[in-house]
Amino acid sequence: MCWLYANKISLNVNKTELILFKARNRNLDFDLKIKLNGIKINPSPFVTYLGIKLDENLCWKYHLNDLSIKLNRANAMLSKIRYYILPTTLRSVYYAIFNSHLIYSCLSWAQSSSKIKRISVLQKKALRLMKFLPRDSHTNPLFHELKIIKFVDHVKIESCLFINRCFNDLVPPLFKDWFNLLKNSHNHETRSSQLGTLVIPNVNTKCFGRFSFTNSAINSWNYFQKELPEKAFFKLKVYELKRMLNNFFINSYFDIDQLV
């Protein structure tokens, strides 16, 4: 407060929030007393920062609940407007009112597939609505026909693109040393190191280790680098890597049953 007063800056008490990040199984055994202009600021279970709801355990339940409401509202709009516009226009509307909410900052909150299952269900519902199909119809042919990437796959693509930006100095210096090539940490050459795979860090926890952004992104990178070994990913431009991975997934959605 002394620094604020010295620089003639004031804070709006009504808009000031306090959050304490902690592990889910750990309780705080002290009373944190913070006052602003004589008014006590109580800890909140979550805060909203740049459109993302950060909860105290970083389990994203508040953000996922809010996102589900937005996506359900978008699906309701798609179900009404689909009767009056062309399929190509409907696809553009999908990207505007559904996909824009779906992918916003997904690298931070969508690393665990178990947490985002209901989000993926809502995306499949959107595609069925766009094609006037029943709720139990198979969606792989729809993703292939509409050339839309499944949400779980979009997260993997964005993870690989982020790593590519790190190697090409397109991110802040903070992230520069997050990822290391396997060939730089081994004295002997292996097929994996020649492909441009990354070192997988050792983790001791599930939530903040195996499902962390770093670990999930590296696993996605190494998997796709082995599936598409024609070029080392870190040498590609961002748009080249994105196009390659998009085509990989769109082709993988092709269902042989639809030819029968």
Image (tube, helix red, strand yellow):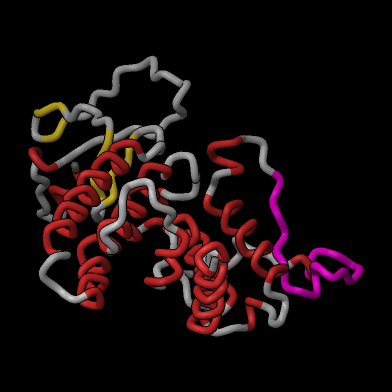
- Can residue 69 be seen at all in this image of the molecule? yes
Q: Is residue 181 left or right of residue 217?
A: right
Provide residue 255's location: percent of width, then percent of height: 54, 64
Residue 194 lies within the magenta run = yes
Residue 19 lies within the magenta run = no
Front residue of this view, candidates 31 and 108: 108
Of the 4 image quadrants, the one containing the N terminus is top left
Q: Is residue 205 left or right of residue 76?
A: right
Image: 125 above or below 22 = below
Provide residue 100's location: percent of width, then percent of height: 27, 64
Magenta stretch secondary structure, dominant: loop
Image-quadrant location for residue 55: top left
- Which residue shows up at 34% across the image and 36% down it? 61
- Which residue shows up at 38% across the image and 46% down it? 136
Image: 91 above or below 131 = below
Image: 26 above or below 52 = above
Image: 168 above or below 91 = below
Provide residue 214's location: percent of width, then percent of height: 57, 54
Give the residues drawn in magenta, as a range: 184-202
Front residue of this view, candidates 123 and 160: 123
